[in-house]
Amino acid sequence: MEKLVLLTIFCLLGSWSVLADPGDAAKSRQEFCSHKDDPNYFKELASRPQNQIAFVNPHAGLGNGGLCWWHSQLQGSSLFLTVYRPDLAKPKGDEVSYIFEAIMKTQAVIEIPGYSNFSDFTADNEKLLIQLLADWQISQGVFGFGFVDGIAADSMSAASLRADMDDLFDRVENKKEITYQVLKMPGLEAHAWLVVHMTRNSQGGYHLQVLDSNFSGLQDYDYSPGQTSFAYTALGVEFAPRTHREGDLSDYQELMTNYCSGNVDPSYKLYKIRNSNNVRQPQVGDLCGDGKGHNSKFVVSGESSKLVCDLRF
């Protein structure tokens, strides 16, 4: 009997720990808003596979050279700007595109219907998301001249790299950022990663844990005083990391505050009208169809008792 009681307590404690796992993404506005002022919550999210993009940097984009900058941008923003609604129907087609653009443009916290985490969402929509990332590369990286951000030397003086590493440590550990960096490699090659954690190492330098789009999960790097570059072993090259997108965290914080105060553009709410019989009347924030069975536009206003559909992206 005593063994049975102990086993029961163990099982209950085990179940409780799963339900209370801080690495699980929020499933409601209330849950999300209870965490929004805790920077360690978002770092914990970044550390868990279920919150990471399910596919690595693909051989796609211009010259099949990869989409690492944009993959990392999507990954970083998704940690701060998504809430999951597994109780709703999964998005399809244009709805997935709307979710992608809302995250990439850092325009709002968006509720993703039909999923419990970002890994499952990206796994189910891998093909479309890769195409959207490739399109984003063209619009931002070429026509928007975003490629200029990656042009720099692939090494720097030991003093400069030390100063940059000290600044990075301040950002990552003191300011609690998840920091986006461009990694300049020889020639015109440049990669990107997200620095999630840093600790001081025994050499008087730092140990870094990063999300690198070429790999699954956190990757480990070490910096020691006197270095002028890092080794990217997978490619056999040296690189110099430089911090970019320095305003991301403040943008995320503003959007989270807006979401939690209810000040959200309703065009980002993906609550579907659940059936064609219209058990209830459509409301501002619902999806409305184009008459061809496609939920491709949003109800965004209701002036004079007339609901108006408008494509906002």
Image (tube, rainbow, N blue to C red):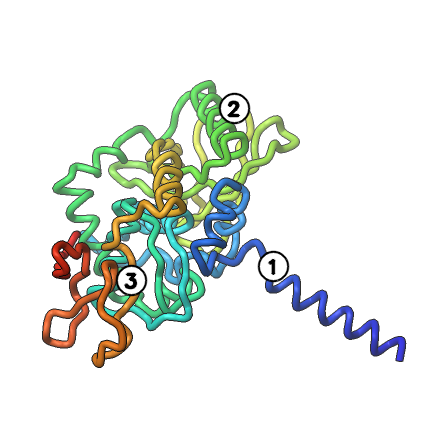
Q: Secondary structure at mark 1?
A: loop
Q: Which mark is residue 270?
A: 3
Residue 287: image location, x then y, percent: 22, 65
Of residues 207 and 155, the one nearer the viewer is 207
For the residue marked with disc 1, what is the amino acid?
Ala
Q: Earlier in the sequence, mark 2 or mark 1?
A: 1
Tell me the CA gap for discs 2 and 1: 43 Å
Tell me the CA gap for discs 1 and 3: 26 Å
In the rendered image, the vertical position of residue 144 relative to residue 78, given as above or below = above
Q: Earlier in the sequence, mark 2 or mark 3?
A: 2
Kindly identify the residue that appears in the image at 39 percent across and 34 percent down: 241
Q: Secondary structure at mark 2?
A: loop
Give the residue number, with chain letter if any, for mark 2.
226
Of the residues tagged 2 and 3, which is closer to the observer?
3
Residue 146: image location, x then y, percent: 21, 38
Is residue 81 shown left or right of residue 65?
Answer: right
- Looking at the image, do the residues carrying marks 2 and 1 touch, with CB atoms under 8 Å apart? no
For the residue marked with disc 3, what is the amino acid?
Leu
For the residue marked with disc 2, what is the amino acid?
Gly
Is residue 204 shown left or right of residue 129?
Answer: right
Give the residue number, with chain letter if any, for mark 1.
20
Of the residues tagged 1 and 3, which is closer to the observer?
3
- Which residue in the rendered view is the most extreme toward the top? 159
Residue 142: image location, x then y, percent: 15, 42
Kindly identify the residue that appears in the image at 27 percent across and 51 percent down: 102
Residue 115: image location, x then y, percent: 40, 67
Q: Secondary structure at mark 3?
A: loop
Q: Can residue 182 be spotted in the picture?
A: no
